[in-house]
Image: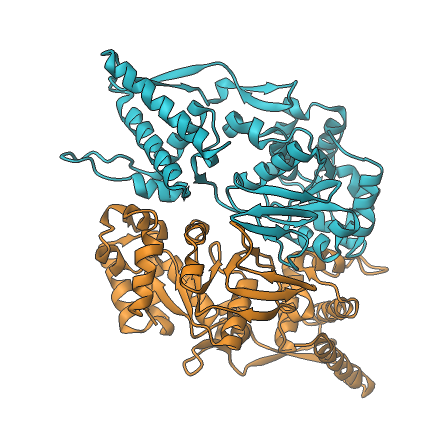
Chain colours: A orange, B cyan
């Protein structure tokens, strides 16, 4: 979305409020409800999304007035960012917005949680990514492989960045893809696995893009995967630890998350497939010596996964139940037990060649 | 250090053991003691270092035999990495090394902590960085600015990487600096601050190198700062939150850390100066509205800092005591309260121009 369009949406919101005031009515902002009561699983799209429930935030209402004021302050701040074409983190925004209201002891925002959630309100109300309001998420993650992008006037070739790679920023809205020379994206959970595959030139030998998430995929990473998939129809294979946390990381990349359900259609990538590590892999590749005993918290999480509709597939249920029954899990690095390059020379090529994916 | 030299040191260790066995003696490995009893503050060098105490690890000794075996396994593994010119993470190393010893129920390593500490033993025993043994640390951090490096055959210009930056790898031993166009290094704690300065083109306007540590500086970052300072005499300015944790991050970059005292001379950069945020800054720049109340844990840490010889400077004592007395702290982003670009347009230029550094 262009900057002008973001501005237009804020202006429209403001004009509606002014019109209401002009008519002598109580001004309000209509905001879709984000709570779990309004989060639905959209089977057709393969994404979490918000239902139809909305709430109105009125100015003349003791329970709403403060939040109403905060919403307008946040909208004004975003408008200013857009006008000046600068970006801010949520924390900078908080400090910028926090002040004591003239002739009172009232502060605009007491703590960052208040401004953070107000930005999300605005994101929902305007049906716009807060990234497009020039609010940056925290940055994490690294990329390498057959991609040339243009960003801030620089042309950046992801295949020419040595052992380091391109540090993925928190906000990828202004990145333009100039040239893609890749058959798929391989998204890996651990830095160590990224480094292994990077050193072994996996992305070069197998003509792919390698993305390291460093744990849970940050917003910038998810948006980047989404864009690459949407624009170039690149398949996405996720490779995580063999445990419920790794599988959750996969599901967030694919279908979005409960608390960001309102932006799943922009951050999620339903085409994502799960490559591994599965519990079956542990036995198929004889990694029994590298097994980790599952803890109670792992087993509890596994039981939770079984309840989610997006894990209700025979293949997933088999894996999760096997994990619960055997009380085991394993890390990506467990594959090093065979030999260091086993993951890049045998495991991944076999899985991809045979299309051994979980849905 | 060249790969050949690393190999030579492992071979020398092995030959000495073989010689001892050849003479019919009990083979041993001499390892400097790493415990706090042997860590000393080297005032002249401005670094933590190890004292003279060493211990001998014997093969024929019930208490030593297992650790002796582990040390040789770890040395053999590193030798193999060097021979094959590949690198491994500590976790991959653990999985590679873990197995059950033939005709017994004894395992080589029960948990990763055992192999991790054995690699450190080897690092100390050989007086060599474990990075030079091809064991990679976890990666974190990002760089931008006037530097061109060569890495894995790629030429990488840190000033041409858009909003992302160069993702700093865990191991920077093989990086060659081709061209440096910078007057100093600015090392910042927070991603948000890195992004602010990066968007405001601070490194371009002020001809410097910008390094984001994302919290505590990872080993690769510290080694990179050390190398840039050692090779090009570039000053280093550290910019952290105004709290004991931020000041500790600074001290680790400068003088090293207690538990890695044996490698301080290779990871530490005593020339580092502390730019801010100071407690005085909070009042000088009228950031009272952005103050955070210090918690008990902050105050305890502040009292700890006062005991360290490297904080025994009048300027530091004034700051730390002011923090304790007023029970306050502040974040880098607090400067956004003035205005978003205040940090890049006023605060940093003023501090650097006036050389307002803490030692």
For the residue pair A7 and B230, the one nearer the viewer reads as B230
Residue B114 x/y as whole percent: 35, 33
Q: Is residue B331 visible?
A: no
Residue B273 x/y as whole percent: 72, 33
Position of B118 compared to A151: left or right? left
For the residue pair A73 and B314, the one nearer the viewer reads as B314
Q: Residue at x 69, y 35 (%)?
A: B232
Picture quarter with the C terminus of chain B: top right
For the residue pair A8 and A74, the one nearer the viewer reads as A8
Position of B252 compared to A19: left or right? left
User: Does residue A167 sit above or below A20 in this rendering?
Assistant: above
- The quarter holding residue A178 reads bottom right
Residue A31 x/y as whole percent: 63, 77
- The quarter holding residue A160 reads bottom right
Q: Residue at x 83, y 49 (%)?
A: B346
Residue B183 x/y as whole percent: 75, 40
């Amino acid at each position: 979305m262009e900057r002008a369009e973001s501005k237009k949406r804020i202006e429209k919101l403001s004009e509606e409020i002014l019109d209401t005031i002009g008519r002598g009515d109580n001004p309000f902002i209509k905001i879709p409800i984000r709570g779990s009561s309004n989060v639905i699983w959209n089977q057709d799209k393969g994404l979490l999304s918000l239902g139809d429930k909305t709430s109105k935030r009125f100015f003349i209402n003791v329970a709403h007035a403060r939040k109403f004021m905060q919403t307008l302050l946040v909208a004004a701040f975003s408008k200013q960012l857009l006008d000046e074409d600068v970006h801010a983190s949520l924390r900078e925004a908080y400090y910028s917005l926090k002040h004591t209201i003239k002739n009172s002891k009232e502060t605009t925002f007491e703590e960052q949680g208040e401004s953070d959630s107000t930005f999300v309100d605005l994101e929902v109300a305007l049906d716009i990514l807060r990234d497009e309001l020039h609010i940056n998420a925290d940055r994490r993650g690294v990329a390498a492989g057959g991609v040339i992008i243009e960003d801030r006037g620089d042309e950046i070739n992801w295949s020419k960045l040595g052992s380091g790679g391109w540090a993925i920023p928190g906000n990828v809205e202004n990145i333009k893809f100039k040239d893609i020379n890749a058959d798929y994206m391989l998204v890996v959970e651990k830095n160590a696995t990224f480094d292994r595959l990077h050193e072994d030139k996996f992305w070069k030998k197998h003509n792919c893009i390698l993305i390291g998430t460093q744990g849970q995929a940050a917003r910038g990473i998810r948006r980047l995967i989404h864009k690459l998939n949407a624009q170039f129809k690149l398949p996405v294979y996720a490779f995580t630890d063999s445990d419920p946390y790794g599988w959750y990381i996969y599901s967030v990349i694919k279908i979005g998350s409960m608390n960001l359900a309102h932006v799943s259609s922009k951050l999620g990538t339903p085409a994502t497939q799960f490559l591994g590590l599965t519990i079956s892999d542990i036995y198929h590749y004889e990694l029994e010596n590298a097994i980790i005993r599952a803890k109670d918290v792992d087993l509890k999480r596994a039981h939770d996964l079984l309840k989610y509709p997006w894990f209700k597939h025979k293949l997933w249920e088999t894996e999760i139940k096997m994990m619960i029954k055997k009380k085991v899990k394993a890390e990506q690095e467990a594959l090093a037990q065979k030999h260091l390059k086993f993951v890049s020379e045998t495991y991944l090529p076999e899985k991809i060649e045979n299309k051994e994916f979980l849905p």
